[in-house]
Image (cartoon, rainbow, N blue to C red):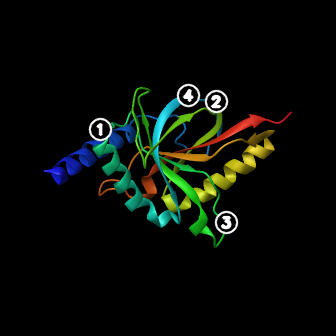
């Protein structure tokens, strides 16, 4: 019975997330970088240290814990990168899988409750395979520096659609945020 509930939860979540990806987005025309103001929000996350190839089992573990705690996502799945991977040292990279949740959500370990408090972000939509987001992030970091900003927080990716039979890797959409502030 528990497995049927888990499968149903994952199916409903997948349908919700893929419907988000079909909404019209104004910045889908490549690496068009803009500055956005973001309202604070609460999220639940599962931190992990290790390579990004661990993403799938971490997502499954996260969903199992959310189901066990009766937590319902209030938005699409996100990844939060607390440390930047250094070439050849990806095993020590700290990142998390996260979902926005309601303010009243009660979160228990090993999940963590977080509050997004970065008001200003550089934002763009990465179109294409997940393993090519590093190129987009590099462009964004250069843009930040060139436009008189500095980075103030973790890089975050929000998955606007998910890979499946109808969405090839070339059509995946990820909104990337890098918290920033104006350099004085």
Find disc 4 in the rendering and name its residue.
40
Tell which circle, 2 or 1, labels the residue nearer the N-terminal end.
1
The vertical placement of 43 against 96, above or below, is: above
Q: Are marks 2 and 3 in contact (CB under 8 Å)?
A: no
The number of numbered discs placed on residues in the rendered structure image is 4
Q: CA distance from mark 4 to mark 2?
A: 7 Å
Tell which circle, 4 or 2, labels the residue nearer the N-terminal end.
4
Tell which circle, 3 or 1, labels the residue nearer the N-terminal end.
1
Q: Residue at x 31, y 39 (%)?
A: 16
Q: Which mark is residue 70?
A: 1
Q: Is residue 33 visible?
A: yes
Find disc 2 in the rendering and name its residue.
119
Q: Which mark is residue 54?
A: none
Q: Are marks 1 and 4 in contact (CB under 8 Å)?
A: no
Residue 22 versus residue 55: which sits nearer the camera? 55
Farthest-out residue, right: 184
Image location (x, y in percent) of residue 49: 54, 61
Farthest-out residue, bottom: 88
Image location (x, y in percent) of residue 153: 66, 43
Find disc 3 in the rendering and name its residue.
86
Name the image quarter holding the C terminus: top right
Q: Is residue 163 visible?
A: no
């Amino acid at each position: 019975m528990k497995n049927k509930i888990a499968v149903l939860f994952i199916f409903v979540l997948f349908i919700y997330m893929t419907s988000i990806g079909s909404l019209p987005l104004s910045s889908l025309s490549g690496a068009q970088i803009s500055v956005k103001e973001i309202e604070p929000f609460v999220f639940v996350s599962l931190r992990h240290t290790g390579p990004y190839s661990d993403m799938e089992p971490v997502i499954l573990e996260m969903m199992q814990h959310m189901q066990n705690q009766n937590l319902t996502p209030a938005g699409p799945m996100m990844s939060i990168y607390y440390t930047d991977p250094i070439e050849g040292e990806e095993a020590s990279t700290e990142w998390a899988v996260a979902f926005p949740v309601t303010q009243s959500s009660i979160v228990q370990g090993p999940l963590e409750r977080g509050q997004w408090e970065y008001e200003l972000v550089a934002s763009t939509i990465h179109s294409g395979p997940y393993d090519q987001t590093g190129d987009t992030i590099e462009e964004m970091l250069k843009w930040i520096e060139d436009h008189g900003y500095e980075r103030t927080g973790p890089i975050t990716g929000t998955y606007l659609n998910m890979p499946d039979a109808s969405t090839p890797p070339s059509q995946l959409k990820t909104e990337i945020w890098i918290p920033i502030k104006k350099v004085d």
